[in-house]
Image: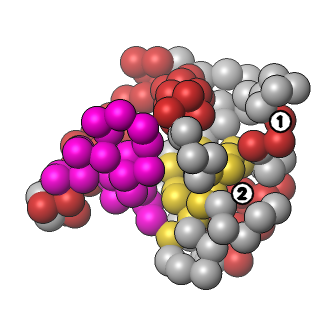
Amino acid sequence: MESSKKIILFDGVCNLCNRSVQFVIKRDKKDVFRYAPLQGEFGQTFISERNIDTSKIDSIILAEPGKAYYVKSTAALEIAKHLGGAWPLISVFTWIPEGIRNIVYDFVARKRYKWFGKKDQCMVPTPALKAKFLD
């Protein structure tokens, strides 16, 4: 894997998360991101090495090689900064304190399976997209 790529770790069985990854892939014109389900080998190793409590963070993590990692609403806003179109404009929401942003984020995260459903297994990328996935 190229060390310059940012890695989006996502809930591989969540329909909302899978749709979000598809959304990002379509708008990632500069090929900034790589993807891995949290349930996969890469995701589990990442979580274990950093002692991340998955009872508190179980939907999205953005890892920037050589830097920190971001979770929840901050991860989503950091991802949006790198998308095509007007999506980087939503970074203005970083002015809202993270605790307040995460109240909304956590509410949606708790309801995501009920509202959007879930799969029995992680998404399998198409052959054309397989190179973008780490697992």
- Give the alpha-carbon distance from disc 2 to disc 1, as whole Å: 16 Å
SS for tag 1? Answer: helix
Quadrant assignment, res 128: top right
| Residue that lies at the very extreme toward the right in this rendered image | 127
Q: Residue at x 45, y 65 (%)?
A: 70
Specify the segment rendered in magenta. 70-93
- The number of numbered badges drawn on the structure is 2
Q: Nearer the viewer, residue 23 or 11?
A: 23
Query: Which residue is labeled 2 in the image?
Result: 43
Quadrant assignment, res 14: top right
Query: Which residue is labeled 1 in the image?
Result: 130
Dominant secondary structure of the residues highlighted in magenta in the image: helix
45 horizontally vs 72: left or right: right
Mark nearer the N terminus (2 vs 1): 2
Q: Residue at x 63, y 73 (%)?
A: 65
Where residue 57 appears, x then y in whole percent? 48, 57
Q: Name the quadrant of the N terminus.
A: bottom right
Q: Is residue 106 visible?
A: no
The amino acid type of the residue labelled 1 equals: Lys
Where residue 67 appears, x then y in whole percent? 54, 80
Quadrant assignment, res 104: top left
Reply above or below: 19 against 135: above
The amino acid type of the residue labelled 2 equals: Gly
43 horizontally vs 27: left or right: right
The answer to whether residue 85 is magenta is yes
Q: Residue at x 39, y 57 (%)?
A: 78
The answer to whether residue 45 is magenta is no
Where residue 53 appears, x then y in whole percent? 53, 66
19 horizontally vs 35: left or right: left
What color scheme is it? secondary structure
Q: Is residue 96 visible?
A: yes
